[in-house]
Amino acid sequence: MSRRAFALAALSTLTMAHGAAAVPARPGPEDHEPPPAAEMRGVWLATVSNRDWPSRAGLTAAAQRTELIAHLDRAVRDRLNTVVLQVRPTADALWPSPYEPWSECLTGTQGQDPGWDPLGTAVQEAHARGLQLHAWFNPYRIANHTDPGRLVASHPARRHPDWAVPYGGKLYYNPGLPEVRAFVQQAMLDAVARYPVDAVHFDDYFYPYPVAGQTFDDDAAYDRHGGDFPGRAAWRRANIDTLVKEMAAAVGRVRPGTRFGVSPFGVWRNATTDPRGSDTQAGVQTYDDLYADTLTWVRNRWIDYIVPQLYWHIGFAAADYATLVDWWAKAAEGTGTQLYIGEALYRAGAAGQPSEWRDPVELSRHLTLAARYPQVRGHVFFAAKEVAADPIGAMARVVADHYGQPAKPPR
């Protein structure tokens, strides 16, 4: 963002007005403002459990395509430039994969051909609109239940029941098995080989989030493969490190120029746990609980970009948005790993949220604050359903205050 654009954005947060009140008069030829520098303006389009799209399972192929196009068109209207589409939500596929079944979010029946190619269409239609399409994969989640019998008979988790671990009411592939790691990479890379996606994108799920009173049973895998490590935690982190490094290298081989990014939970470690951590009191730490050493990935540039999910308001005591933007900016500085911020649009105006999220200006303030840091190269909003509905006008305020002109995504 230019210095002049930043000043306008900062000024606009002082008023509650929308639309024209936050937009300067049309410049004349003598003071025409150059287009903004490249920045990420992204939106997550989640398919798991039909969260954002399709609106429900079982729609006709034509109706699914119409809804998809509507999301892409909305992104263009809001002057976004990237759609992060969830194409493998639960060890399944939104393309004709030879490795995993068609996703049940399409037809309501896992393995049933929907009669069209959603990922292929999404790439083509996004590019036709000047949007980037990042293919979002969840590496290890198999199902939002624990019954393998509910999976289609040909599902890899049924052919290899030893790969699956029930935990917290869900079913996961075991990250500690090298054969699992090889398989999930093969399944994901099939999409990269078929389609000119602009990036491969992982979310925050590696080892599952901790569930009180439950244990992720990887004893057998640890006994077989963990002997060279000082403990189970170090072994688990090494498993995830290996997945990230191998996937990054494979993406570069399969489709050179395609980027690889990760969107983790927003707290690496609290400073009370590790002096290198953030001044937060988060109940989850990715290093300790999800076994994802995101700081190492950034500093070693194993990934091209990182989008920490900073889903808290400015001033939140346990995890202040301002504190975490500052921490991540310092973490990314000089690494070559691009930093974007994950924004909790879904909280704006939602029931049960703190009062700060009832203010339509809160999200715009986030972008104004982050603009102070040159390391922050943009933002990604969760998620597409809220971009479309925008119940209290929070996204409209972001657009009016910060997205007055189109911008190209970073390269």
Image: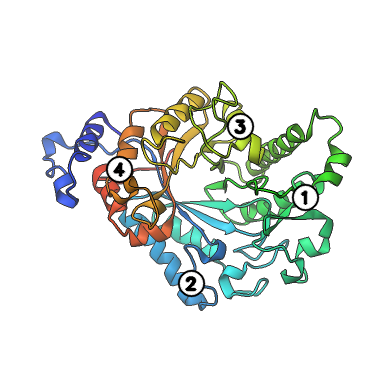
The reply, left or right, for residue 145 in relation to residue 264 is right
Q: Quadrant of residue 250?
A: top right
Alpha-carbon span between mark 2 and mark 4? 32 Å
- Residue 253: image quadrant is top right
Percent x, y for residue 43?
Answer: 43, 51
Q: Check the image and report above or below for 162 versus 63.
A: above
Say whether disc 3 or disc 1 marks the residue closer to the N-terminus: 1
Residue denoted by label 4: 364
Given residues 57 and 117, the one toward you in this image is: 57
In the rendering, at what x and y percent does residue 85 appear?
Answer: 51, 56
Q: Look at the numbered disc 3 and give the secondary structure of its residue.
A: helix
Residue at 41% across, 32% down: 376
Report the amino acid beneath label 2.
Gln
Question: Would you name the residue on which mark 2 appears?
Answer: 64
Disc on the earlier residue, 2 or 4: 2
Q: Is residue 16 above or below residue 294?
A: below
Question: How far apart are labels 3 and 2 at the CA level?
Answer: 36 Å
Q: Residue 397 got which mark?
A: none
Callout 4, which amino acid? Ser
Which residue is labeled 1 in the image? 180
Q: CA distance from mark 4 to mark 3?
A: 29 Å
Alpha-carbon span between mark 1 and mark 2: 32 Å
Indicate the position of residue 381 as horizontal and vertical percent values: 41, 49
Q: Position of residue 25 (x, y in %)?
A: 11, 44
Q: Look at label 3 and name its amino acid.
A: Trp
Camera-nearest residue between 330 and 16: 16
Q: Write the residue at 28% across / 42% down.
A: 402
| Colour option used | rainbow
